[in-house]
Amino acid sequence: MSETLMVTLSHEPAAAHWGENALVSFEADKAVVHAPKGETQRDKVQQAARKLEGQGVPALTLGGDQWDLELAWAFYQGLRDPKNTVAFEQAVLSGADADEFALRQQVGDWVRDIINQTAEEVGPHQLAARAGEFVKSMAPEAVSYKIISGTDLLEQGWNGIYTVGRGSARKPTMLQLDFNPTGDESAPVYACLVGKGITFDSGGYSIKPSDFMASMKADMGGAATATGALAMAIAKGLNKRVKLILCCAENMISSSAYKLGDIITYKNGVTVEVLNTDAEGRLVLADGLMYASEHKPELLIDCATLTGAAKAALGNDYHALFSFDDSLAHRTLEAAQQEGEGMWPLPLAEFHRKLLPSSFADIANASSGAYMPGASTAAAFLSYFVDDYQKGWMHVDCSGTYRKAANDKWAVGATGMGVKTLARVLLDEAK
């Protein structure tokens, strides 16, 4: 008897003896997912996949004629867990839909796997190198990259990445990747993606409690998301020049680690007083945003697991979106809706830029006082390092990148959420 269970889809409710609102029933040697058409259909399919994964089935294949691309993808999203214990095959899609599913699977698996792997496996240099090679695999002739590490960062003026990472024995690193399908070295840069790549975040001397530190291997989720988005867009035919910049470091405690009260002088002349070493993501992103701004892109997107405040506001089901450019934000929210991914706007205004005072520097890296809007002030901090922050720049605080506990739709760990949305934004804006 085959160990592979066929899973079919029905738009009808399950028979009453399976229980009210049953998501899954069984017929002989197959399982039937019950997901009536409607707004929650994809959610129900994803929940059904979680139930089947939890039953220890060794292998699943989709069958029948009710599946479409989006429902098959929802099933796979729910089925996959960090150990990848269930062998899966979709045998219901063909042609362009099959190709699209395979691409989503390839990119989504890469993003989820690299986030889920330990900080010992994925250090700053490993993250930069693996991201560079993954994107290059999509267009070998059009992609080039270089990796800058250690004191070489200082020589080029990337003081934020160096400062945050100097307390670790593993050198801080910046990836500078160029996707240039035109073949013209003087071609304008259409877009830049900047990703926070903190491969482990202890909090530094503002040390995190153990419970909050346990998931900090995933603090490079923004870098992984940006990498996946560019890789997917390239595979779908992106034809304009894009740069990917990853700002990678371990935020560790040692005699050489940066301290509260230190002042960082950035390449653009802005000085920053460190009031909290656990607000390190913005310190490394500043370098990436300045490098991106040098190329004067039409579109600049940064991705980061930046603040607990965004997660407190939105939970794990939405990424937080910040932008002074209302039109760009609106188009991105539309893209998220079309891709079935959670993204929600949080406020960002000029007055937020004034909520980071310092007695010793131009600004501080953290706001202080009761009821401070921490996610908004973090985004405002980043704006000091974007040349034209009011147009074409968007910050994504990746609240939904990683789940510390499973729920009825997702396994524990990385989700890959946001990759499809940002790939669509790249492609739509490039038209």
Image (cartoon, rainbow, N blue to C red):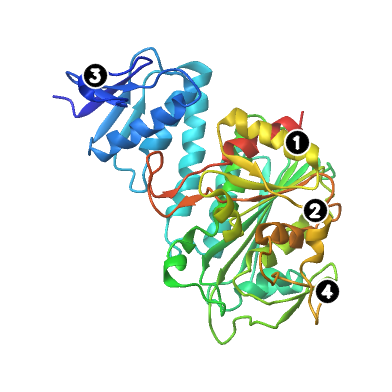
Label 3 – label 2 distance at C-alpha? 54 Å
Q: Which kind of residue does numbered mark 1 sit on?
A: Lys
Label 3 belongs to which residue? 16
Q: Quadrant of the C terminus?
A: top right
Label 1 – label 3 distance at C-alpha? 55 Å
Above or below 79: residue 349? below
Q: Which kind of residue does numbered mark 4 sit on?
A: Asp
Q: Nearer the viewer, mark 1 or mark 2?
A: 2
* Local crowd size for mark 4, using a 10 Å CA cut-off: few (<14), some (14–19), many (≥20): some
Q: Nearer the viewer, mark 3 or mark 2?
A: 3
Does dot 2 land on a helix, a strand or a loop?
A: loop
Residue 328, percent across and down?
Answer: 77, 38
Does dot 1 land on a helix, a strand or a loop?
A: loop
Q: Residue at x 75, y 63 (%)?
A: 381
Q: Nearer the viewer, mark 4 or mark 1?
A: 4
Q: Which kind of residue does numbered mark 2 sit on?
A: Ala
Label 4 – label 1 distance at C-alpha? 37 Å
Label 1 belongs to which residue? 240
Q: Which kind of residue does numbered mark 3 sit on?
A: Ala
* Local crowd size for mark 2, using a 10 Å CA cut-off: few (<14), some (14–19), many (≥20): some
Label 4 belongs to which residue? 362
Q: Residue at x 73, y 35 (%)?
A: 330
Label 2 – label 4 distance at C-alpha? 19 Å
Label 3 – label 4 distance at C-alpha? 67 Å
**Position of residue 183 in the picture relative to residue 69 (left or right):** right
Q: Earlier in the sequence, mark 3 or mark 2?
A: 3
Q: Nearer the viewer, mark 3 or mark 4?
A: 3
Give the image quarter of residue 257: bottom right
Q: Earlier in the sequence, mark 1 or mark 2?
A: 1
Q: What's the mark number on residue 349?
A: 2
